[in-house]
Amino acid sequence: MNIEQIKSLLARFYEGQTTPEEERLLADFFRREDVPEDLQEDKQLFLLLAQTSDQEMPQDIAEEITAFVNNLGQTKIQPLIPEDKQRKGVIFRLKTPPKMWYRVAATVAILLAIGGGMFVHQQRTLATDPFRDTCSTPEEAADAIFYANDIINRSTAPFLRSTMIATEQVNDINETLGKIQPYINQ
């Protein structure tokens, strides 16, 4: 065969349109020593294919592949990574979470829940008896006030601490800026 016929056959091989006889002709051609320089990469491919084609595929693997292909549309393919381990889409992630804001948000959520509960309770109470007294003695009323005050103090304490820390940090920054301001204006 001449080089042009080999190139034509090679093009058909890459398109998957060659017969086993034509593939043997190509393999025989590429086993020769005098293969043109522009076909050296193809020669390496055919030599590699010739090494692997001598190995026989075990029958059970062929049967497994055939069964898998036949059941492809009927079974659900299991992902390589379980769904609970798969990473969900993340738009952005902070390197360090703003811990102070978690505390502030939690405090606000608690205050809103308490306030909402108290509002609903008050509305129900007013709807049944608007002039009903909740405490029978002044001591009982004082205890109720102290108890409510304690709840509010415990709920707002983390927020107040965070606010004080943030205020101190802002004051430190303002003090530092005040020290370097004359140098900036020069």
Image (cartoon, rainbow, N blue to C red):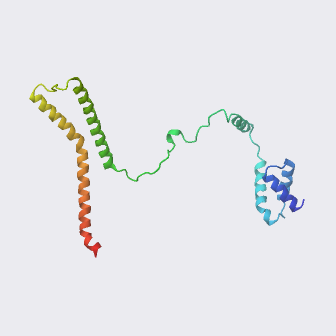
Q: Residue at x 15, y 35 (%)?
A: 146
The vertical placement of 183 against 114, above or below, is: below
Tell me the quarter of the image containing the N terminus.
bottom right
The vertical placement of 179 against 61, above or below, is: below
Instruction: Please state the horizontal and vertical placement of residue 10, each as a whole percent of the image.
Output: 82, 56
Instruction: Please state the horizontal and vertical placement of residue 131, each as a whole percent of the image.
Output: 16, 26
Of 160 and 58, the residue lying toward us: 160
Instruction: Please state the horizontal and vertical placement of residue 132, each as a whole percent of the image.
Output: 17, 25
Relative placement, left or right, of 170 versus 79 is: left
Relative placement, left or right, of 182 versus 145 is: right
The vertical placement of 7 against 142, above or below, is: below
Residue furthest toward the bottom? 186
Q: Residue at x 18, y 37 (%)?
A: 150
Tell me the quarter of the image containing the C terminus.
bottom left
Of 41 and 114, the residue lying toward us: 114
Q: Residue at x 84, y 57 (%)?
A: 8
Total numbered labels placed on residues in the image: 0
Observer able to see residue 31: no
Relative placement, left or right, of 77 versus 87 is: right
Instruction: Please state the horizontal and vertical placement of residue 184, each as a whole percent of the image.
Output: 29, 72
Residue 181, by quadrant, is bottom left
